[in-house]
Amino acid sequence: MSYSDTKPAESRVSDTLARDRLGVAAVVFFVMSAAAPLTVVAGVVPTGLAVTGLTGIAIAFLAVAVVLAIFSVGYVAMARHISNAGAFYAYVSQGLGRPLGVGASWVALLAYNMFQVASYGGFGAIAEPLFADWFGVNAPWWVLGLAAWALVAVLGVRDVAVNGRVLATLLVAEILLTVVFAVAEITTDGFTASSAPLDPSTLTGAGAGALLVMAITGFVGFEQSVVFSEESRDPRRTVSRATYIAIALIAVLYAFASWAMISAAGADQVVERAVAEGPELFFNLAAVPLGDAAIHLGHALFLTSLIAAMISFHNIISRYMFSLGREGVLPRVFGKTVPGTGAPKNGSLAQSAVGLAVIVVYAVMGWDPLVQLFFWGGTGGGLGVLLLVTLTAFAVIGFFARHPEGEDVLHRVIAPVIGAILLLVMSYLAIDNIATLLGVEPGSTPALVVPLSFAVLFVAGILWALYLRAARPQIYTGIGLGARSAANSGGFSAALNEETR
């Protein structure tokens, strides 16, 4: 039996996502929630300072924003021609060929799942001492992680608009707190503005690769505006506007907050303080003018920031699985949604099962949820997304080389080529600095396993696509075509098959 033979009862399921549910603001909320602004400012920035010893994180955020904005010129132009919840998978399939597209989809599933399960570890590890202090509850990290997991699992099978409203509430709260705390830090008595966070020379020295990759980790999620294209109102405009707005907001917020933090701590002391205080640094600095209540509020919203990221990544992953299931690349059961809500229920349940399994394994084995799950998972996921963005940049070039109609030379050639080159350099720097990024010795097991896992899955995906070409040609011809796939609609003309081979 082929995947396409699996047909759940139509009374209970559908094969389409909900239409016209999301506007620009809602998509921006999903994108920025995945980026988790407060988690980045209070967690990633101090970690970057401690690991690299470089204070130019603010200029790194701005530099990465410029690169991603250039990449997005061709990316959103391609979104005007392709509406598919599979995003990278669909774009690589139609730009570079189906085998590479399937390989990219498997890498995407690993990368985004790494972010998702990492959040459970981070939430549990950070919440454990806080709950003991606030409520006298001495629960192990994995119990608290399971509580967050249950919340995300329930929301994952609800209407996407419900998730959007939850994310809007959490996101607005954490952005406001980040801005208020940063402003408080620069109004502290004795504050001296520092030029070190904006020094461009830090982007070319030793460790600069690690600094850039940590910066791009803060933007992960920007690319997911196209994941919600099938559920957006007027996708042609919604996707492009949401993408550019998200990049701009993230860049300004991160650069301002990191500049304020480094200046308030003192450029000559901030690295030492980052090593000693970690995520507490941002809150401790704000507590000087605002009082200790700022620390407690910061901790609370730090946790909700992680929850918002969990919800966003969960929705992203379930829609990837929906896209792959709809086309028959994964079992067709994943390509079904719940009528009325349009939620990709089976993909959501599968992601919940993965998250549960990881929490249980880490609890049983006694592994460190903060370093070995939150930090390593987030860093590894960031590397995977960077590699996917780079591959997609070349897919944009390939797509417009064959379909130049409807776009000018800036959108289909100039910006895509420049973006691809810049991203290729960043990917090289990321792999070259992987040990520094993970905080381990070069050649150690984590430094080898993380990049190799992506390579193995990419090759395995290519081999699976080649198998489908030989054994299930109807499914193969529909790879990357979304609702128009052969597995979904029963076949295409030879011309269309040739066009998308």
Image (cartoon, grey):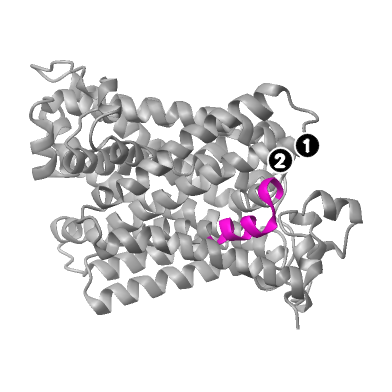
For the residue pair 187 and 104, the one nearer the viewer reads as: 104
Residue most extreme to the bottom: 1
Q: Is residue 349 left or right of residue 188?
A: right
Q: Quadrant of residue 15?
A: bottom right
Q: Quadrant of residue 493?
A: bottom right
> At 62% across and 48% down in the image, what residue appears?
87
Pinpoint residue 148: horizontal percent, then vertical percent.
Answer: 37, 62
Q: Is residue 103 magenta?
A: yes
Which residue type carries mark 2? Phe
- What is the CA distance from the residue labelled 1 to the residue labelled 2? 6 Å
**Principal secondary structure, stretch drawn in magenta:** helix
Asked whether residue 176 is in view, the answer is yes
| Contact check, label 1 and label 2, Cβ < 8 Å | yes
The residue that label 1 is drawn on is 403
User: Secondary structure under badge 2?
Assistant: helix
The residue that label 2 is drawn on is 399
Asked whether residue 158 is in view, the answer is no
Question: Which region is colored magenta?
Answer: 94-106
Pinpoint residue 185: horizontal percent, then vertical percent.
Answer: 18, 25
User: Secondary structure under badge 1?
Assistant: loop
